[in-house]
Image (tube, rainbow, N blue to C red):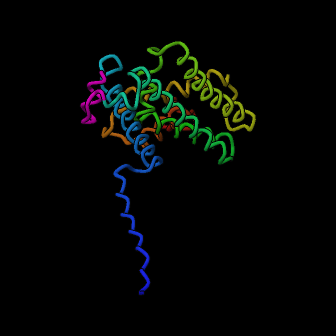
Amino acid sequence: MPKKRPASTPTPAAAPASPWAPASEREQQRETKRNAVLSTAAQLFNERGFHATSLDDIAARLNVSKPTLYYYVKNKDEILIECVRTGLHMMLEGIEETRNAGGKAIDQLMACMRVYTRIVTMDFGMCVIRVGDDELPQESRKELRRLKSGIDMEFRRLVTEGIAEGSLQPCDPKIAAFVIAGALSWIGRWYQPGGEYSPDEIATQCIATLCDGVLRRPDAVRVP
């Protein structure tokens, strides 16, 4: 009798491709969208003010529904906290980069001033200046003011070191740091994108005025 052939095992069908992206990719997409929410909110806070900006306004500019925002943020207070925190971290990171670059204290101070000026003309940095942290709960204010204090201490350190190396004239580092940060911060109040001066031009002129002053030196006076 002929031998029976063994029954062939059916080939399993290929699993359908998943329409969902991998978890890591989904998380990256979520972070990108969350950053878009924060950036858009910072723009609106700068344009209209914190109280005059609603979640509906933010959602409208992003072309999404208001409930969609709650997937990325809890409320408007959290948005402001993150916007101000981001701006302050940008400042601290920029200052840290200038420190790591080394060089004389005066060179580091000039670089820090330029970094600070550039950031206060950007959405998150401008939000630090125009909106601030007065509207936030006390615990959040403490954290953000600690970050601001870190920026102030860096300016004081550079002024102190500049005096020691002879590149800066003797002065009170605390007052000098207040004057420098205060003058540069105010740029974030009046700066308008697309205006007469670029951020780099503003930085150059403001830093020159702070360092050289506005009084004409006696040796620069022309003899008639």
Please state the horizontal and vertical placement of residue 16, each as a whole percent of the image: 34, 57
User: Which image quadrant is residue 108 in?
Assistant: top right
Q: Residue furthest front?
A: 1
Quick check: 215 left or right of 122? right
Q: Nearer the viewer, residue 35 or 2?
A: 2
Please state the horizontal and vertical placement of residue 212, each as a whole percent of the image: 55, 35
The structure residue drawn at horizontal position 47% and vertical position 24%, both measured from the top left corner, is 81
Quadrant (top left/top right/bottom left/bottom right) for the N terminus: bottom left
Q: Residue furthest bottom?
A: 1
Considering the whole magenta stretch, tell me its main secondary structure: helix
Please state the horizontal and vertical placement of residue 196, each as a whole percent of the image: 31, 39
The answer to whether any part of residue 214 appears in the image is no
Within the magenta stretch, is there residue 57? yes
The number of discs equals 0
The answer to whether any part of residue 139 appears in the image is yes
Q: Which residue lies furthest to the top in this view?
A: 138
The structure residue drawn at horizontal position 40% and vertical position 45%, both measured from the top left corner, is 29
The structure residue drawn at horizontal position 39% and vertical position 50%, both measured from the top left corner, is 21
Quick check: 83 left or right of 180? left
**Depicted 69 relative to depicted 54: above or below:** below
The structure residue drawn at horizontal position 52% and vertical position 37%, both measured from the top left corner, is 90
**Depicted 54 relative to depicted 106: above or below:** above
Please state the horizontal and vertical placement of residue 28, each as a whole percent of the image: 44, 45
Q: Which of 48 and 167 is in front in this view?
A: 48
Within the magenta stretch, is there residue 209? no
**Depicted 7 relative to depicted 215: above or below:** below
Q: Nearer the viewer, residue 212 or 74?
A: 74
Q: Nearer the viewer, residue 60 or 125?
A: 60
- From which residue to which does the magenta span run? 54-67
Quick check: 100 left or right of 201? right
